[in-house]
Image (cartoon, rainbow, N blue to C red):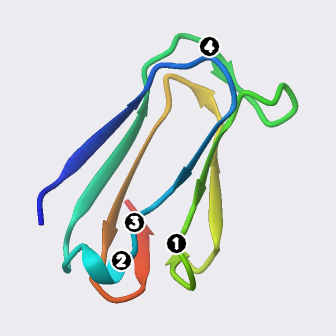
């Protein structure tokens, strides 16, 4: 496995589904970075929605929302069924 950075360069709402943790290998790191200069909000429908694949979880949840200005989210996987935010 290799670590990856996903750059978001759109000002619109973005929805991403993470790859299955079981296919990534333990310790895989994935960073999602907002490269567009806006303040992202759910109210303005400009947020970034991250969804876990299948039955996987992101810190015990099925999805996670990124809001704010120039935000980033870094996750790592257990290689089985979980992604963790750090």
* Image quarter of residue 69: top right
Q: Determine contact: label 1, label 4, CB under 8 Å.
A: no
Q: How far, Cα to Cα, is label 2 from label 3?
A: 6 Å
Residue extending furthest toward the top: 37
Q: In terms of depth relative to the viewer, which is nearer, 59 or 30?
A: 30
Q: Which mark is residue 53?
A: 1
Q: Determine contact: label 3, label 1, CB under 8 Å.
A: yes
Q: Is residue 65 left or right of residue 9?
A: right
Q: Which residue is mark 3?
A: 19
* Image quarter of residue 19: bottom left
Query: Which residue appears at 24% of the width and 59% of the height?
Result: 29
Q: Earlier in the sequence, mark 2 or mark 1?
A: 2
Q: Determine contact: label 2, label 3, CB under 8 Å.
A: yes
Query: Which residue appears at 41% of the width and 70% of the height?
Result: 84
Q: Which residue is mark 4?
A: 38
List x then y, in percent, for residue 65: 66, 49
Q: How far, Cα to Cα, is label 2 from label 1?
A: 8 Å
Q: Is residue 5 left or right of residue 13?
A: left
- At label 4, counting other C-alpha atoms closer than 10 Å, the crowd grade (few under 14, some 14-19, many 20 or more) is some
Q: Which residue is mark 2?
A: 21
Relative to residue 79, is residue 19 depicted above or below? above
Q: Earlier in the sequence, mark 4 or mark 3?
A: 3
């Amino acid at each position: 496995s290799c670590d990856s950075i996903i750059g978001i360069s759109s000002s619109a709402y973005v929805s991403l589904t993470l790859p299955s943790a079981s296919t990534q290998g333990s310790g895989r790191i994935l960073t999602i970075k907002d490269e567009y200069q806006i303040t992202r909000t759910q109210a303005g429908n400009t947020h970034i929605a991250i969804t876990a694949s299948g039955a996987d979880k992101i810190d015990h949840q099925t999805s996670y929302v990124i809001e704010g200005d120039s935000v980033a989210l870094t996750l790592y996987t257990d290689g089985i069924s979980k992604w963790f935010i750090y």
